Amino acid sequence: MKRVSMTVNGVRHEADVESRTLLVHFIREQLELTGTNVGCDTSSCGACTILMNGQSVKSCTVLAVQADGAAVTTVEGLASNGDWHPVQKAFHENHGLQCGFCTPGMMMAAVGYLDENPAPTEEEVRLALEGNLCRCTGYHNIVKAVLAAADDMGS
Amino acid sequence: MIPASFDYERASSLDEALSLLAQGGEDARPLAGGHSLLPLMRLRLARPSLLVDIGGLEELRGVRSDGDSVVIGALTTHHEVAGASELTGGSGLLATVAEGIGDPQVRHRGTLGGSVAHADPASDLPAALLALDAEVTLAGRDGERSVAAADFFVGPFMSAAADGEIVTGVRVPKREGWGSAYRKFQRRAQDWAIVGVAAVVNWTEDGIAGAVIGLTNMGGTPLRAPGVEAALAGASEKAQILAAASKVSELETPPADENASSEYRLHLAQVLIARAVAEAAGCPGMQRD
Ligand SMILES: Cc1cc2nc3c(=O)[nH]c(=O)nc-3n(C[C@H](O)[C@H](O)[C@H](O)COP(=O)(O)OP(=O)(O)OC[C@H]3O[C@@H](n4cnc5c(N)ncnc54)[C@H](O)[C@@H]3O)c2cc1C
Ligand code: FES
Ligand code: FES
């Protein structure tokens, strides 16, 4: 077992993990933050996307031990004081989800990207979400939601 | 799936990483971004006994300009390479290629050194490094050495790096004034390149004064296309570029797999060479799309 310590959604956690524990399993099973999903076995779907030190990463392809010392944000960390994050609000208002399985990962990828590029074009948003698959929406409303969130955050 | 059990050590210096690898023996592996190794371990296609995490070695990270060359540390992520302003002239090819790897999440974790060390014939950076005459720098317990990209990739997933050696970075000539382009063909977004073509071209008033072609997934290692390069010299019109591209058929027959027959690979290479060269030349009259 290895001792890891990381800040998740602003709260410091210390725990013992096996070297082979994937970060996503640490988040879901040890920290019981089940908003982050697992949708594939091949690092392709993006349902497990979180922010690690501010950048979007697929937490199924990071070991918990690699995140030792890191600052992690999951979907549970987006809202503050009961107020939705602009990206959450925009997904809600623009019907950016149907079953909702891809949604946490989509939103984390979007939040990470908007931090880098606050005023993207539609084309840029589509490319930024390339690593996130959605089997329901056909993507249009997701892209609309991200553009709306960018507007909202910029104004 | 979860990988089989292994030991994990995080190295705090290059020296420490080298001694941990030496102690760990032949089943010990460096871990950089983990974006090739962890997927293989999850499928149990790789079962190292010890992972030496070199991800925190800041000394191996970053892009810097050094005279006519650019030096890139092994742990520089694809995202960082894509945004590096030091990559000017022909060396800008590396930024273009890095920008097209996987998706943003993959680019935030995957590293240049990991891509190079993994030596996957379908990965994009090796062909670009070959086309740019890059040198790969290595550190081992006996010191440092550098190997030309042309000698570094020796077979599918096989490189000139010895067990226990760590790729520390690459040195790439800038080739100021040259243009570059990378074209890859994939059936679905996100797939690996069925064929990829890197072109670095010196375009002058008289047409092409020099051209280098690097090919992805046309063999067990990245390949140059000497016949095409020779035929491109002096070309100034689309028809000449197309004729030069057809010389790719002089190469050894490319592999066939579930994605493409050998003939199809050759066809793709020919089409992509013409497009990449036209784009790299930056001559609007020659661009096809
Ligand atoms: C979903 C997905 C899509 C992808 N798409 C593409 C794509 O389109 N094109 C492409 O080219 N690649 C693609 N990749 C692969 C990606 O580029 C990897 O990041 C890269 O191949 C490996 O870099 P890494 O830092 O993650 O290496 P790791 O996975 O950490 O290591 C890979 C191998 O190299 C060894 N190693 C790592 N660093 C060093 C070093 N410095 N010295 C010696 N040995 C070392 C390791 O021991 C291991 O054997 C994709 C990956 C994923 C998960
Ligand atoms: S679970 Fe599909 S990419 Fe992580
Ligand atoms: S809303 Fe169902 S997968 Fe995206």
Image (cartoon, coloured by chain):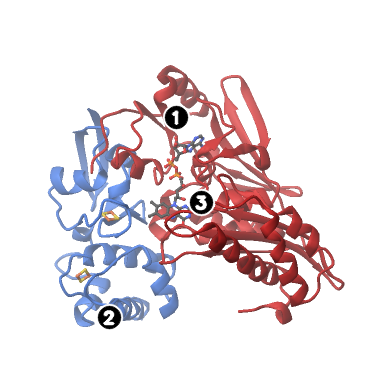
Chain colours: A blue, B red
Of badges 1 and 3, nearer the viewer stands 3
Name which residue lies at 21% across and 37% down: A14
Q: Image quadrant for the N terminus of chain A?
A: top left
Secondary structure under tag 1 reads loop
- According to the picture, the residue beneath numbered tag 3 turns out to be B123
**Label 2 to label 3: alpha-carbon separation:** 33 Å
Locate residue B242, reporting x and y percent: 71, 71
Q: Is residue B129 above or below residue B99?
A: above
- Label 2, secondary structure: give it: helix
Q: Nearer the viewer, residue A22 or A154?
A: A22
Which residue is denoted by mark 2 in the rendering? A141
Q: Residues within 10 Å of mark 1 (few under 14, many from 20)?
A: some
Task: Identify the residue shown where x is 23% and y is 65%.
Answer: A102
Bin the neighbour count of mark 3 within 10 Å (Cα to Cα): few under 14, some 14-19, many 20 and up. Answer: many
**Residue B61 image offset from top left, x and y in percent:** 53, 43
Secondary structure of the residue carrying tag 3 is: loop
In the image, taking residue A114 as reference, residue B61 lies left or right, namely: right
Mark 2, residues whose alpha carbon is within 10 Å: few (<14), some, or many (≥20)?
A: some
Q: CA distance from mark 1 to mark 3?
A: 29 Å
Q: How many marks on residues?
A: 3
Q: What chain does badge 3 belong to?
A: B
According to the picture, the residue beneath numbered tag 1 turns out to be B12
The Cα atoms of the two marked residues, 2 and 1, are separated by 45 Å
Question: Closer to the camera: disc 2 or disc 3?
Answer: 3
Q: Quadrant of ligand 1?
A: top left
Q: Residue at x 45, y 23 (%)?
A: B21
Beta carbon of the mark 3 residue lies under 8 A of ligand 1: yes
Q: Is residue A96 above or below residue A60?
A: below
Amino acid at pointer 2: Asn
Q: Quadrant of the C terminus of chain A?
A: bottom left
Q: Is residue B83 visible?
A: no
Specify the quadrant of the image occupied by residue B44.
Answer: top left
